[in-house]
Image: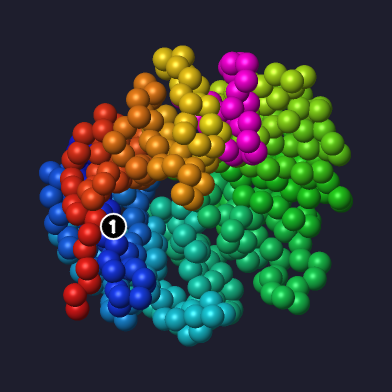
Amino acid sequence: MPAPDGGAMLWPAPLELAGDGRGVTYTHYGFVDISGKLVVSQRYESYQYCTNRDGRASFVIASLSGQKDDIYDLTGKLLRPSPTTDTLCGGADRVIIRHVIDGESGKVDEGLFNVVTGKVEVPIRRNRHLTVVSPAIVNVSDPSGEYFDDLLNNARIPHPGFLDEQASIGQDLALIVTDRRRDLTSKSVKVGVIDTMGKWLLKPSLVEAYGFGAGFSIIRVGEQLTFLDAAMKQTGGTWDDIYQIYNESTGSVLGYEVSTGADHGLLGVDLAVIVQPGAADIDCGAGDGVCAVTEAGATSMIALPAAARTALPPGFSSALSPAFYGDQGSGEGRSQRIFVVGTGQVITLAAVSSCEARTNTWLQCEPGAGMAPPVVLDASGTVTPFSSVMAVADPIPEVGASYYWATSGGIEGFIDSKGTWRYQQSRYTQLED
């Protein structure tokens, strides 16, 4: 099971365990290496992949309640245990270590640990909170103020304001800050923009702003929304609502659905108009930038970020993916007839089903309970022996998926895009201890 770039990888292998005999089940995780061998046993309750400065997965944090987290490299070698039982990814070669004070309220104290050296670089302190801005920058927030920890240059960079965490994660050019800390009693908080050197790009003057995905921030001006570009200029028109359309694998912005009153439109990632605002019905719910646009009774598919349209055949109005269309004749999100783009076939399912694409390779259709068994189609329209297929995240998110976790009868495991088993295990395992 090699990674697409030829590098090391641990693929997560779940195992559902029957617990106390009262119908309670537990899922534990282990890891399979590139040879298709289980090299880390299935004993962990959760895991996180952490990336290097290039965005590739470089190590994994594996967790089991009540025990210090384990940190593995991608060959299955235990690098070292974390100093704490609660650990998060913390930038290139680092993890955020945490002492949970109150789990219900989310109160934690945090620090930064270097996985390579085994040293605590930022000690845990009371009311200290860390946020990963990018692989190279971590924001450290103390009661006395905040600063950026530049991991590449081992430098502390003071900055004004207080980082708006949700609006700045993953950004490395322009970061949203508030003029004072937000809390439940905050009123009239003003929002501004700084760069990663802590310099003002726009002093606090905005009421509301969201992170600079694809080079634009969504800001509120009065009762409407618009865009702010990297030059701190408003652009892209004003709208009642703006919805970002994401690639679910990479988190990157692919475009925007906009609306004013009853008019709906579609903008590209560069804010170019793809669908003029009007009476069009726009449905981007299939995910990963696949949108079905219905105008004057005709439906076409747009796969963002490209702006080209593909007309759906008569009788089909749901773009499940670029490879599959549904008739959607029995309610939103449910189909009985599937059009297979690659072959032009029409597959009629045994019952009306909820269908979801697993990349462009598979389509999984689930009928109502007791109506018929689930069906998985491949890109040629063949009904496969699988009852479920789920894409497995690649170590390089932009690649998509190379492998899938599949179920067939009493067997589950990894398959490749051709449906060939790469790792198998029994689905029937009892928890004996």
Residue flagged by tag 1: what amino acid is it? Pro
Q: Nearer the viewer, residue 260 or 292?
A: 292
Query: How many residues crowd around disc 1 within 10 Å: few (fewer than 14), some, or many (20 or more)?
Result: many
Q: Quadrant of the C terminus?
A: bottom left
Does the segment drawn in magenta span residue 87?
Answer: no
Residue depicted at x 59% and y 39%: 333
Numbered disc 1: secondary structure? strand
Residues drawn in magenta: 308-334
Please give the name of the residue rendered at 59% of the width and 73% of the height, measured from the top-left corner. 145
**Image position, residue 306 (x, y; %):** 56, 23
The residue identified by callout 1 is: 14
Q: What is the quadrant of residue 22 in the picture? A: bottom left
Residue at (35, 29) in percent of width and height: 383
Q: Say above or below: 338 vs 183.
A: above
Count up the numbered dots.
Answer: 1
Q: Is residue 316 visible?
A: yes
Q: How is the image coloured?
A: rainbow
Relative placement, left or right, of 178 versus 302 is right
How far across and down, in percent of the image, does residue 59 sit?
Answer: 27, 56
Q: Residue 18: horizontal and vertical position, in percent? A: 28, 69
> Is residue 72 in view from this perspective?
no
Q: Would you say 193 lies left or right of 151 here? A: right
Which picture quadrant has residue 80? Answer: bottom left
Horizontal arrangement in the rendering, residue 328 relative to residue 95 (left or right): right
Residue 134's place in the image compared with 24, above or below, is above
The answer to whether 235 appears left or right of 17 in the picture is right
Q: Relative to 343, say whether 61 is above or below.
A: below
Q: Is 18 located above or below residue 419 in the figure?
A: below
Q: Position of residue 209 (x, y in %)?
A: 70, 52
User: Which quadrant of the structure image shows residue 295?
Assistant: top right
Q: Which residue is drawn at 76% across and 66% down?
A: 189
